Image (cartoon, helix red, strand yellow):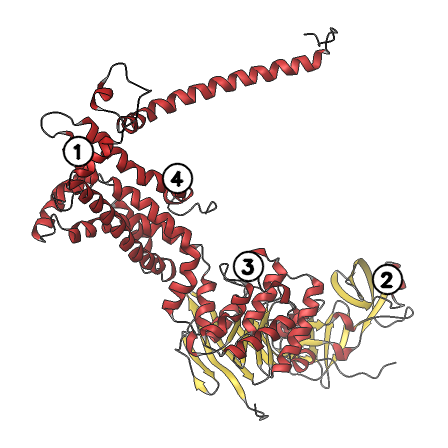
Amino acid sequence: MTTPDGTSSADLPSVRLGEASQRDRRWTLASLFSWVVALIFFAPIAWIAMSAFKTTGQILSVPPLFIFQPTLENFTEMFQDPKIPKFFFNSVLLSVGSVLIAIAVSFLAAYSFSRFKPPGTDFLMFLLLSTRFVPAAAFVIPFFQLFGILNFRNTYVGLIIFYVMFSVPFSVWILKGFIDGVSQRFDETGLVNGASRAHVIFRVVLPQVKPGLVAAFVFNIIFVWNEFLFNFQLGGTDTNSIPVALFTALYQGGAVNWTYVSALGTAYVLPLAVLIYFFQKYLLVGMTFGTVRGEV
Amino acid sequence: MTQQGENHVLRLESVTKVYGDTEVLKDVGVTVRAGDFYVISGQPSSGKSVLLRLILGLELPDLGSINLRGEVVTGEGPQRRNIGYVPQSFALFPNKSVLDNITYPMRVDKTSKKIIEETLERVSELLNIRDLLDKKPGQLSGGQKQRVAIARGLAKETDIFVLDDPLVGLDFKLRERLIDDLKKTRAALGVTFIYSTSDSLEALLLANRVGILFGGTIMEEGELDTVYDEPGNSASMATLGFPSVNFLDGLMMKSDTESIAQCPIGSFPMNPTDYEGPVVLGIRPEHIEIQSEDSAQGFLAQVLFTEDVGGSEIIYVESNNERLILVLGASDPQLSKVRTGEFAASVQPEHIVAFDPNTLQRISEGKESSRV
């Protein structure tokens, strides 16, 4: 290697330069590989999202079109279907409604588990979580029967109760982790100064576990928003959510309605994607049952 | 506040608290009078905090009764007791500003705005935290948090305050200042302080009355000076000693007319007692004297090391295989003797207290001697 003025450069720097460029090359290869893997997994979502803005012909064209004139026609057409706003309404009502109720219930339960430690707390906590470890398909039949007897099938009350039950376990775990992290000395400071237990719960402890409440909300919203099986089985035309609408639309009229499915799919993913984008740090909290709280 | 002699605001009688199989407190009796600076003094984990929690109502006793301001409150929760509280771990609300933390007790009590402002002014002035009022606890140093916690504890319209070892871990200078401030505050407000500490010096500097907590019970209770000068048991003497009290194993012997206590550093005439047998002799460090010249009296002490604690020097010596501590003023001329590594020392008999090694109770004390 020579420098611009023609003299041979010192050996040492050139060796370092060689090592550095080798490291760069390996780094480039590794990131290239990662990008390929990532794109493969991202491709279906990209395909749906792109298809939502294509005509049927463009969707089915071979080779696939990457550059095209986007159209919003699929969306305007989709929302002309009177059932569609209803599906969205159902999805929002069932997920937001049930998760809010579940968090209220879970917060009080978690406080009780954390502070009063009733006999068998550890076992109860395990039992609670165990309901989420068993495969949902195993419970479809008993729930179908039960909801039939209770006349809960295809009612908002019934489905909200179901999703509350669905959301309570993780919420209790997340919130207990957070409440455990709030020293009991805070409760005692309140009580000694004449505060009621309700004051301690809602005015002393609750403000200190707000991140936990957000984490429990985001984490469970994702579950309920995406839940398909029980909505399909226990719900009906009045209460079906978007996943069921997507599934039934897929098999309507003998052929797949590609524009409808892609537009609905895109509109369905969007709210959740936005939610997750803004609250992603809370997801870690949820996935670790509230034991990792450093980020929030 | 009336000035009656038996005007107690708090009385615990035969209080016992059990956790699982452990009797944390047994048969505890405490009497606090209005206006006391009552210090519960005991080793770490001797049950001081539990005792305070029983007083506050955060725990309920398994046996015994608690009388507060003339009413039995044994089974009552903390809300009904109206006691100001400085917890050991601060417990400052992280989501509230310092100002909101301090005024919290009064806001819960729905104290009038005027009193809240006056009290805030007073306690923030007292604890020198006026510049911190807008900050959040997370922005404070350890010492600042402690001062805010004390301020919050004091910012309550009441006559009794419980302080759970509030100065633990503070640096020396700040502690010295707060000790002074706490004493003044109590006096200025005319209120009652119940204070726990495992630090002898704090107890000695703050208390007008002490309760010695040892082995899960109050071994002795009384005026600080009385308990210090005439300890009724070895635990009291040990707890209220700075630097640590010297305890020597000895033997009490009795003749027709007198009792003699023998120990590795000599024999001492004691006030007559019927007791014979092994004893523990307590001697405070300040009562071991260095002899001016080598006299027949006393014992020979080898210096192990010395420790300068600002203002005074603690000297660790060995004599006849017994380790002893003595203390001298930093400018004491006798220090030159210490520097030689060996000196003759003596103890006046009246400064020696003999205790039963099993019951820890005081048996006798050295005879008053006329000095040579």
Name the subunit of mark 4.
A
Residue that mark 1 sits on: A247
Q: Which amino acid lies under the numbered mark 3 shown in the image of this protein?
A: Lys
Are the two marked residues, 4 and 2, in contact with CB atoms closer than 8 angstroms?
no
Residue B136: which numbered mark, if any? 3
Residue A277: which numbered mark, if any? 4
Relative horizontal placement of residue A66, taking residue A261 as reference (left or right): right
Residue that mark 2 sits on: B338
Residue drawn where x is 72% and y is 64% of the image: B173
Q: Residues within 10 Å of mark 2 (few under 14, many from 20)?
A: many
Q: Which amino acid lies under the numbered mark 1 shown in the image of this protein?
A: Phe
User: Is residue A294 visible from the viewing direction of this image?
Assistant: yes
Are the two marked residues, 3 and 4, in contact with CB atoms closer than 8 angstroms?
no
C-alpha span from label 1 to label 2:
94 Å
Q: Secondary structure at mark 2?
A: helix
x and y, in percent, of residue B252 in the image: 69, 75
Which of the 4 quarters of the picture holds residue B6?
bottom right
Q: Residues within 10 Å of mark 3 (few under 14, many from 20)?
A: some
Are the two marked residues, 3 and 1, in contact with CB atoms closer than 8 angstroms?
no
Q: Nearer the viewer, mark 3 or mark 4?
A: 4
Which of the 4 quarters of the picture holds residue B230?
bottom right
Q: Residues within 10 Å of mark 4 (few under 14, many from 20)?
A: few
C-alpha span from label 1 to label 4:
26 Å
Q: Are marks 4 and 2 on the same chain?
A: no
Residue B340: which numbered mark, if any? none
